[in-house]
Image (tube, rainbow, N blue to C red):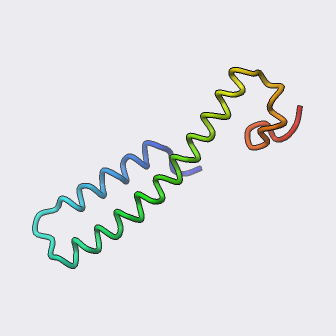
């Protein structure tokens, strides 16, 4: 995978910087605000996936590898 969570943080901060630029006209502000909304929606989806992965890892830590067949995304459905 090319992008990692630190890259997501970098994208979010870059968008904040674009929104904070002085001298933006109303059209540029509207364009950046629309872009920011899209970035936030995508970021939320990425973070939901990360949260689900952490929950699955926590289940394995608590219950052991015997639950891997029930978590095919991390256990490949085998064991």
Residue 20 falls left or right of residue 70: left
Residue at the (41%, 60%) spot, across then down: 39
Where residue 6 appears, x then y in whole percent? Answer: 43, 42
Where residue 70 appears, x then y in whole percent? Answer: 81, 37
Relative to the observer, which residue lies in front, 65 or 1? Answer: 65
Residue at the (68%, 22%) spot, across then down: 61
Determine whether 62 is above or below 51 in the image: above
Determine whether 24 is above or below 50 in the image: below
Residue at the (58%, 47%) spot, across then down: 49
The outermost residue toward the right is: 79
Residue 15 falls left or right of residue 44: left
Quadrant into which the C terminus falls: top right
Where residue 28 sits, quadrant-wise, is bottom left
Determine whether 60 is above or below 71 in the image: above
Q: How many marks?
A: 0
Where residue 71 appears, x then y in whole percent? Answer: 77, 38
Residue 33 falls left or right of residue 44: left
Residue at the (24%, 61%) spot, across then down: 18
Where residue 62 sits, quadrant-wise, is top right
Residue 39 falls left or right of residue 78: left
Where residue 26 appears, x then y in whole percent? Answer: 17, 76
The outermost residue toward the bottom is: 27
Where residue 50 sits, quadrant-wise, is top right
């Amino acid at each position: 995978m090319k992008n990692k969570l630190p890259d997501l943080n970098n994208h979010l901060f870059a968008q904040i910087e674009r929104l904070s630029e002085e001298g933006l006209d109303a059209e540029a502000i509207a364009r950046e605000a629309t872009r920011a909304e899209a970035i936030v929606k995508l970021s939320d989806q990425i973070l939901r996936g990360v949260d689900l992965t952490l929950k699955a890892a926590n289940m394995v830590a608590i219950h052991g590898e015997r639950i891997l067949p029930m978590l095919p995304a991390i256990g490949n459905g085998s064991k």
